[in-house]
Image: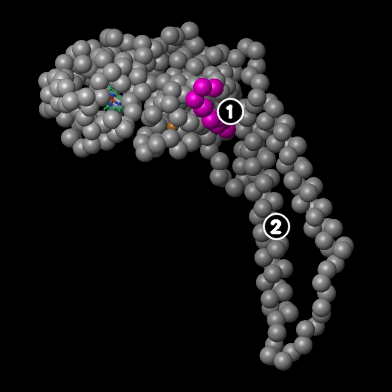
């Protein structure tokens, strides 16, 4: 089955039911292109050799300007191929538009440069990691908090743009009993969304239904508040904009941040304390650091980071030299 689906070995593992639609169509497109590439190249090379001009004053052997039969044939064949591709693609596309009624619902929030996943029945975002069960359709409702992003899991043959101000929906199902439970797959942002776009990646963990019932996205956090703070820094996307080594990224570095004194764009000075950090995360626009007035940090609300999470970040910041 797999060999027929992907004889050229170009596609990622077919970890969703859509692979059965998409992979053969892809293979058809690739094989057709390969065939015509070979055919046209062969005719071209043959003609170059066979009909080449052997000496400078050789007259033209033939002055044909057109051939109706030939032209009809090379118009009809591509038209038929294109219509086949259209019909085939449309069937698969329609199927992808409407999620089954029993699909379990996720919410995904995209922002520069991190994914936030709200699992079914949960109220809080899990940064960059998504757990899905095998054998159950999954519906994902997506919103963007800033610019265009695109949710793309190649193994699921699913990709959809995440557009600010619009709810975008996609769905997929990981087939059951084919060994996908226990495997991890890449989640990418497939729409260039700024200079740290490449950092906007995540992981989709496929688990079996029993394991899924245990809500594996909960817990797993370190016991130590400082370690938790570092976890949020890495996973919630702060690291894309804030370095630890003093170098300037989109935002100020965290090097020696705790207790640091600085200036705001309005000329007033500030000291980094718990209140300031809390406000900087909840309402980044309230106080803009001097020199950073053109850069934008999107606010993190309670679904993204709770007050406890911010307290962890503060504990971790206190340890930064
Ligand atoms: Cu993005």
Q: Is residue 62 magenta?
A: no
The reply to whether residue 130 is visible in this rendering is: no
- The 10 Å Cα crowd at callout 1, few under 14, some 14 to 19, many 20 or more, is many
In the image, is 211 to the left or to the right of 39?
Answer: left
Residue appearing at x 48%, y 31% in the figure? 148
Give the residue at mark 2: 36
**Magenta-colored span:** 157-166
Compared with 215, 76 (above or below) is below
**Helix, strand or loop at mark 2:** helix
Q: Is residue 164 magenta?
A: yes
Compared with 153, 72 (above or below) is below
Q: Is the C-beta separation of discs 2 and 1 under 8 Å?
A: no
- Which residue is nearer to you in this view: 146 or 14? 146
Residue 166, horizontal then vertical, whole percent: 54, 22
Placement of the N terminus among the 4 image quadrants: top right
- Which residue is nearer to you in this view: 103 or 19? 103
- Which residue is nearer to you in this view: 233 or 223? 233
- Which residue is nearer to you in this view: 130 or 303? 303
Res. 229 image quadrant: top left
Give the residue at mark 1: 16
Residue 106, horizontal then vertical, whole percent: 51, 16
**Helix, strand or loop at mark 1:** loop
The reply to whether residue 159 is visible in this rendering is: yes
Residue appearing at x 57%, y 22% in the figure? 169
In the image, is 142 to the left or to the right of 78?
Answer: left
Residue extending furthest toward the right = 69
Residue 27, horizontal then vertical, whole percent: 65, 44
Residue appearing at x 76%, y 42% in the figure? 84
């Amino acid at each position: 089955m797999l060999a027929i689906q992907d004889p050229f070995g170009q596609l990622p593992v077919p970890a969703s039911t859509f692979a059965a639609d998409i992979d053969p169509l892809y293979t058809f497109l690739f094989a057709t292109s390969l065939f015509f590439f070979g055919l046209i190249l062969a005719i071209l090379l043959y003609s170059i050799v066979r009909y080449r001009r052997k000496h400078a004053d050789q007259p033209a052997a033939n002055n044909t300007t057109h051939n109706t039969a030939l032209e009809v044939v090379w118009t009809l064949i591509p038209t038929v191929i294109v219509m086949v591709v259209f019909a085939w693609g449309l069937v698969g596309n329609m199927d992808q538009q409407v999620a089954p009624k029993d699909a379990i619902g996720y919410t995904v929030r995209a922002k520069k440069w991190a994914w936030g996943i709200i699992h079914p029945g949960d109220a809080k975002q899990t940064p960059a990691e998504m757990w899905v069960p095998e054998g159950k359709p999954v519906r994902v409702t997506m919103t963007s908090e800033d610019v265009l992003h695109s949710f793309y899991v190649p193994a699921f043959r699913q990709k959809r743009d995440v557009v600010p101000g619009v709810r975008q929906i996609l769905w997929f199902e990981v087939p059951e009993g084919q060994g996908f439970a226990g495997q991890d797959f890449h989640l990418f942002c497939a729409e260039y969304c700024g200079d740290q776009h490449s950092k906007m990646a995540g992981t989709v963990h496929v688990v079996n239904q029993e394991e899924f019932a245990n809500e594996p996205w909960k817990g797993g956090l370190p016991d130590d508040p400082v370690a938790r703070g570092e976890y949020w820094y890495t996973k919630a996307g702060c690291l894309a904009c804030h370095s630890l080594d003093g170098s300037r990224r989109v935002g100020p570095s965290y090097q020696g941040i705790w207790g640091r004194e600085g200036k705001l764009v309005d000329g007033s000075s500030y000291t980094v304390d718990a209140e300031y950090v809390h406000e900087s995360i909840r309402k980044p626009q309230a106080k803009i650091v001097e020199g950073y007035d053109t850069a934008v940090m999107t606010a993190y609300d309670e679904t993204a980071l709770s007050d406890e999470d911010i307290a962890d970040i503060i504990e971790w910041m206190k340890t930064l030299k």
